[in-house]
Image (cartoon, rainbow, N blue to C red):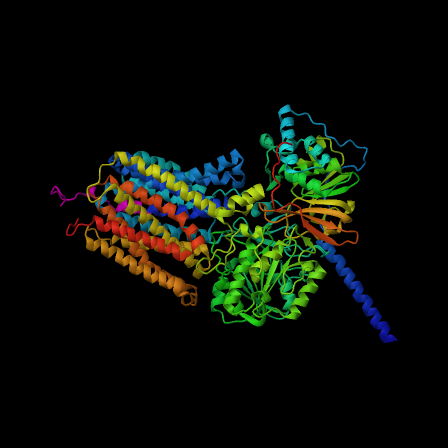
Amino acid sequence: MTAIRANGRAAVTRLLALAFAGALASQAFAASPPEVLLQGEASQRNTRRPAVDEDRRLRDDRAAMVRTQIAARGIRNEAVLAIMDRVPRHEFVPTDQVRAAYQDAPLPIGHGQTISQPYIVAYMTEMLRLEPRDHVLEIGTGSGYQAAILAELAKDVVTIEIIKPLAEDAAKRLERLGYRNITVLHGDGYFGSESAAPYDAIVVTAAATHVPPPLVAQLKPGGRMAIPVGETWAQNLLLIEKDKDGKLTTRNLLPVRFVPLTRGR
Amino acid sequence: MDADGRLPSAADRPSWLHLAALFGLSAATLAFEVLLLRLFEFSHWHYFAGFAIALALLGLGAAGTTLALLGARSERWGDGWFLGGLLAAALGLYVVLCLQAYVALRPIFAAWDARELGKLLLVDIAAFLPFYGAGLAIGQVFIRWPRHARKLYAFNLLGSGAGSIAASLLLAFGSIAAALALVALLLLLLGTGVALAQRQRLAAAFCLIALLPAVLLTWRPPAPAVSDFKALARVQDLPDVQVLAVQPGLIGQLTLLRSESLRYAPGLSLAWPQPIPVMDVAIIGSDTEVPLPGAFPYDAHHAPASLAGLPFALRPHGAALVLGASAWQSPALAGAENAITWIEPDQRVLDIARERGARSPRFALIADQPYRHLAISPAHYDLIVADQAYNGGDAATEDYLFTVEGITLALQRLAADGLLAVPLRVEQPPRHLTRMLATIKQALVRYGAAAPWAHIAVLRGLQTHLLLVAPRPLLKADSTALRAFARQWQFDFDWLPDVTGEEVNRYHKLEAPTFFATARAILTGEAALPDDATWFATDSARLSRPYLWRSLRWERAPHLIETMGWRAMAYLDWSLIFSAATVALVVMLAFVLILAPLGRLPPGAPPLSRLSIAAYFTVLGLGYLLIEIAVLQRVILFSGQPVLAASMVFAVFLIGSGVGSAMAPEARTRRAALHIFAVIAMGFTVAATALWLATDVLLEPETTLRLTLLIMLILPLAWAMGRPFPWALRQFADQPRWIPWAWAINGFASVAAASLAPLISVHHGQPVTLAIGALCYVVALMVALRWTTAGVAFH
């Protein structure tokens, strides 16, 4: 009996030691909490439409972009098309790139980041199948353009950017444009934002060597994550889906074959 | 006495000051070329770097055209002209030095952004200036003293050889910017000395005034601006990043960085629940990332859930060989019971690992080239992991490990139940996977495998394939373990000898099981390749054509672009495209710039005709560079480091040719011509035989002896190849107006050949490049024989 008790105490001690080590280990891995630069609200009664005063040429350029680069390439979701037509992409590019804002190409925004080609943004948004009640996480705010697009569809968006100047610029821009349901954080997106988890959808804009396990954990069952994989200039977009049992599958989001422009639409 | 019976005066021959100045300017020019290549690789992308260098080198050819157009005027300006060219070159160096500190390039955007294109052209045109200035000065001396072509050419080449060595030494011990600033300062000092000695007061005053800022720039050289899209810039942008060390080196600057945001785990399962620990990273140059743990052994608790840890799970005991260094990090993920031998050419990476605990008895770190180690080491291993495959490579970069012969060597070094593991990034459509499988299959056949398909397993995760190759058919225990691993950690099979349809597209779903279909087609030959896989090259890589990372099929490129749209741009081999574009551009420019002065040149005295002069100097320029570059490509196999090989080969060729040119015959006789080219043939035979047929013998010796042997084998050829050019220039002694024109033609042909050589080697093999180079010398001989008249000699 004494031996069993002694063995039991030893087992408990080992368990406690393991738990303590695990706690210490997770502390070693956990990043410091991200800094809030813009606090959004999730109320559906908030006005999400940005108030933008713009010149007609930019307005026309944007309409042409939607018509020739997005709709003509097979994007069918009316809500996505409307949002791409509404959100002023030129507000999200550096001032010296405004003229190129509606070109069919990605644009550099500094610090090795780009604002994605309009078609890619629209395609990814359509593939996420967002609902008005969805709570979305974006890793890699960049200019804030993708966050703005997502915020037009979803209930709210939490977006994290590790490069402080980019995060600050994006926060100011989104606030100026009137987005009230976007929270902009400055911090390491590897750990997501646990305080606001779980998320219906997660968008990762920066490729990494692996999908951060904390992000997978913060995805709700039934949720979807869009993530680029591959080299900067040869990326594929993957969609990671978590079923109700927590099982994960991925599929290639961007078709290998290019969706051709269809004329006459 | 000359033809008029006069004794030669001091003005009729170059003084030692002139020769020293020529030597120094030539040294500075070639040093600048070497440094520029390294600088542009740092700030451009490497395929743009080659294109930019070619554009810059056109400055030499353009200088020749300018001199041909100016005629006797440059000769009349004498020392002033030379000094002017020298100072223009020095000024150009400073322009490049300052410009590169402020202009960070994003060449990929130049395709649609006029500003980026403008920046690219500005930097490239600035690099043109030093070569143009140097060309004006160097070309002029051949016009001034046509009867001393041998001596002048010798000093030109010897100086160039010295410059190549000096640049390599500077890069080995200092930064690119410091090296560039020092070369510019030395050139300015040379100009100052020459100006003072020749009493050129204005030039001397200019040089003396310029010296102070020049010294300051050398003391604190401005660092190159790095594009924000380069890995170095992106990592330096991370919060709390610390630079732990910066080390110069021939391979490229190594920057060791630490940040709490750096985590690398390629091949990790999506189902792994824990975050990955932070790692430091060594960035070589501006883009190659090599993660390094803070300490060895490393607690890789995620290894059981990772493709990177899988080989060590299959072979947890025994000896493991790791080839190369990459983000795959096998030395960090190795099992506690494995004895690790790590082969990596960059000694600095090994030194850092050693300082962090990767030491004997468990670790043996060897700075060597993987192919060589496999060829000479008698050791056998239970596991060989080719980490360097994860880095991929450029289409025109030699990778001797991933050839049929290299993989065969690896199989021969495995124990009977050993495994070879090759990680490869997933690319859709299949791009490099096809050639890797084809190469492995041929290696297995060569090794003696009756059914190669039974020796291979290919697993696929989100971003990575892992190819496992066994010298014998895969053990049932391994198949069972692989299936259990795949099920537990959610990986798909692209191939397993008895794979079922359900296992190939289960977790990471593709529109169609393209990778499985590709593997089946390659390994069994029982089905056609899927259409996607045929867009890229599918042949195996051989030792004579070691370019596994070349994927471009020119005839399929239009279809690729039509099918994939703009995304196809990322799947093209831009180094080959830029090489082809360079050749086309040089040919067009040469056509214009060579024809332009023709109207102003007098007719050649028979048998020297314009066509024969053009032909001779064209084939000489082509042949010299084709042979030199083919030799360089092969020497990389023996030296292990491309930059070391380039330094050594360029120096040997330049110095050897310099000495040879000083000993070139002058007589325009059949005997002299035959002698010149016969010696080239002998030297060529020795070098080609040794480098391509005596591979094993040359790989065996240690570094110093091996490099010495290589130098001894190449030097006679280089010496011999230095003689045809000055011999021919000497024939124009009484028609010096032809000299700059001939020199310009030779310059253009050399630049074209520098881009043509990689194209030929990549597509047809290095022996073909060598053979075409040899053929060029045969044509040159035929032209030379037409020129010769028995019994006529010149003094």
Query: What x and y, as percent, mark residue B127?
Result: 42, 40
Q: Residue A93, can we see it? A: yes
Name the quadrant containing residue A118: top right
> Residue B616: x percent and y percent?
28, 47
Q: Residue furthest right?
A: A1
Percent from the top left, x then y, of residue B768? 39, 55
Instruction: Judge by depth and name the residue closer to the eye, B154 or B616.
Output: B616
Give the number of callouts: 0
User: In which quadrant of the rendered image does the N terminus of chain B lie?
Assistant: top left
Q: Is residue B743 above or below residue B546?
A: above
Which of the two residues, B330 or B349, is positioned nearer the viewer here? B330
Left or right for B420, reference A243: left
Q: Quadrant of residue B701?
A: bottom left
Hey, which residue is sitting farthest left in the picture? B5
Query: Magenta stretch containing residue B213, yes or no?
Result: no
Residue, far top: A56
Q: Residue at x 41, y 54 (%)?
A: B646
**Residue B343 visible to the viewer:** no
At x 32% / y 56%, what residue is drawn? Answer: B718
> Closer to the camera, B649 or A70?
A70
Q: Work out whether B56 lies above or below B538.
A: above
Which contiguous range is marked in magenta?
A: B1-23
Q: Is residue B29 left or right of residue B235?
A: left
Q: Is residue B341 left or right of residue B130?
A: right
Q: Position of residue B40 (x, y in %)?
A: 47, 45
User: Residue B5 magenta-drawn?
Assistant: yes
